[in-house]
Image (tube, rainbow, N blue to C red):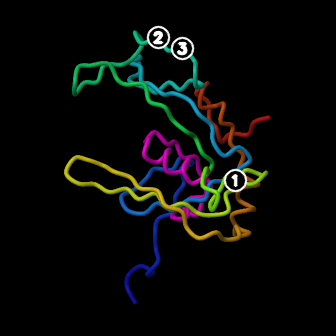
Amino acid sequence: MGFLPKDYSAPVTKNYMDLEEGENRIRILGPSPVFVGNEYWIDTDEGRRPVRVPMNTPIDESELAIDPRTGEKTKIKHFWALKVWNYAAKKVQMLLVHQKTIREGIRGLTEDQEWGEPDGKGLFAYDISIKQSKANDRVSYSVSPKPKTQLAEEIVKANESVKINFNALFDGTDAFKAHV
């Protein structure tokens, strides 16, 4: 027996999922499976911070922060915000997806008759594996479905108990604080 239990990992306390190198297994949860918008960075007296706006909202490009590495204005990034079950963290979290490869992979699955869209409650019938690979300075992603399975009761209960206010992404408040 080792110093720590074989399956030990530190508990995850944060509410936002970060993709790690290797496999990231998730189940997309409802009731609204995807929330879309655009994100850009601005410089303030307190430092650099992200600004998120609903899709199709005009953005004043003069506000964009300057990237210190390139000296150019930062880019506006499209994002999806998803409520997911993160199997590694054993927790409901929000996943912000900026990567086009991931968005296209998930969208492709929802348009495929064999995999399909979420049910009427916004729940997917299958898990998704998002694999992150790094080679030199490049990061790449691949998306693949896992066999359809019944959602574990633990996940159903966690999904029902965790409420996310996705509109908080646009007003800078905490999306996980109690909301009406």
Disc marking residue 58: 3
Which residue lies under the disc numbered 1? 118
Q: Amino acid at mark 1?
A: Pro
Image coords of residue 43 (percent x, y): 38, 18
Q: CA distance from mark 1 to mark 2?
A: 35 Å
Disc marking residue 88: none
Q: Earlier in the sequence, mark 1 or mark 2?
A: 2
Which residue lies under the disc numbered 2? 60
User: Is disc 2 in contact with disc 3, using a CB cutoff of under 8 Å?
Assistant: yes
Q: Residue at x 40, y 56 (%)?
A: 20
- Quadrant of the snapshot with the N terminus: bottom left
Q: Is residue 66 left or right of residue 149?
A: left
- Quadrant of the snapshot with the C terminus: top right
In this orientation, which residue lies closer to the viewer: 44 or 20?
20
Q: Furthest residue to the bottom?
A: 1
In this orientation, which residue lies closer to the viewer: 118 or 157?
118
User: Which quadrant of the view contains residue 133?
Assistant: bottom left
Image coords of residue 157 (percent x, y): 75, 62
Q: Is residue 159 left or right of residue 139?
A: right
Q: Amino acid at mark 2?
A: Asp
Q: Amino acid at mark 3?
A: Pro
In the rendered image, residue 166 lying in the magenta stretch gets the answer: no
